Amino acid sequence: MAVAGVSHAQAAGDGIPDVVRIPSGWFWQGSDSVERQYAYQIDEQVYGHDISRRNRWYDLETDKWHVHLLAYDIAKTPVTNDQYAVFVNATGHPAPDISQEDWERQGLIYTYDTIIPFLWKNGRPPRGRGRHPVVLVSWQDANAYAQWLSEKTGETWHLPDELYWEKAIRGPDGTFYPWGNIFDAGRLNSADNGPFDTMPVGRFEPGPYGVLDGAGQVFEWTSTSSQPGYRIVKGGSWDDRGCGVCRPAARHGRPEYLKHILIGFRVMRDR
């Protein structure tokens, strides 16, 4: 269910994200056979094929277990274009852009024409997209932003480990989605309801701890390695339907150098 978004001041300001305090305590991480079977079934319903089941995508998830984490702070939303622009302007770090040759070299299914609305021009975000999640950022780009935040604030910021990301999004009870165990296309930005694009952050109800946009919208880089040169991304995206992959337990690895219109990030801060 859509709700009012975060304020423009929160989205831009000094580039420092608003955070949510995640309390110390136990939570259920990962998935069991019941949850994985549900994910395969809803994928088959909406796509009309069983590719995810045949490829065993969800069998790679962590087996459900009870784990205790100390308290930490995590960004309320994915980092926005406006927030990232403050970093780009302050540091001279390359803005989110990619040539047609480099884009095609990545071997993704989207044509270059598809990504043009997401490209920055002259170091500035696309017009009207300031409060959308920043995309076309590699894992290294996301880490550079976190390092800049650390230097700017004197605090320790970094990409969240998969465990910390998952607890923040799904809460302590191990539900399939932030809102419960039944997929509801009205509670996230996915391809089920459109607009088949990113949208301003904060348009949907928060999860159990008040974190926003943790399911759908954009996949998010984590600090967790899946194999050398690859990092786990989580959360699903505006391009997904179903949405088995939008469950917080879902996970897959992407190359650290990848710049994709489906991948953004959020940061966490050590207490």
Image (cartoon, helix red, strand yellow):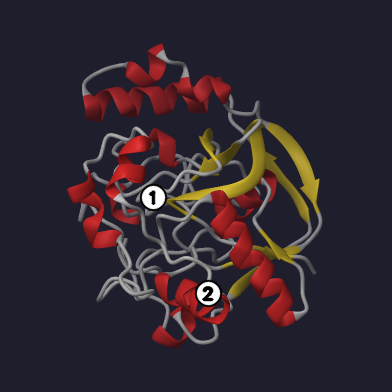
Say whether residue 150 is left or right of residue 259. Answer: right
Amino acid at circle 2: Gly
Say which mark, if any, is on residue 92: 2
Residue for badge 1: 216
| Residue 243 appears anywhere in the view | no
Label 1 crowd (10 A; few <14 / some 14-19 / many >=20): many
Which of the 4 quarters of the picture holds residue 192? Answer: top left
Compared across the picture, whether 180 is left or right of 188 comes to right
Label 2: few (<14), some (14–19) or many (≥20) C-alpha neighbours in 10 Å: few
Residue 200 in the image: above or below residue 166: below
Q: Is tag 1's residue or tag 2's residue first in the polypeptide sequence?
A: 2
Q: Position of residue 91 (x, y in %)?
A: 57, 76
Which quarter of the image is occupied by the N terminus? bottom left
The secondary structure type at the circle numbered 1 is loop
Task: Give the foreground label among 1 and 2.
Answer: 2
**Image location of residue 183, percent across then percent down:** 36, 41
Say what secondary structure mark 2 lies in. loop
Given residues 36 and 222, the one toward you in this image is: 222
Distance Cα–Cα, label 1 vs label 2: 30 Å
Residue at 74% x, 37% y is: 66
Is 134 located above or below residue 8 in the figure? above
* Residue at the image position 36 percent from the left and 44 percent from the top: 102
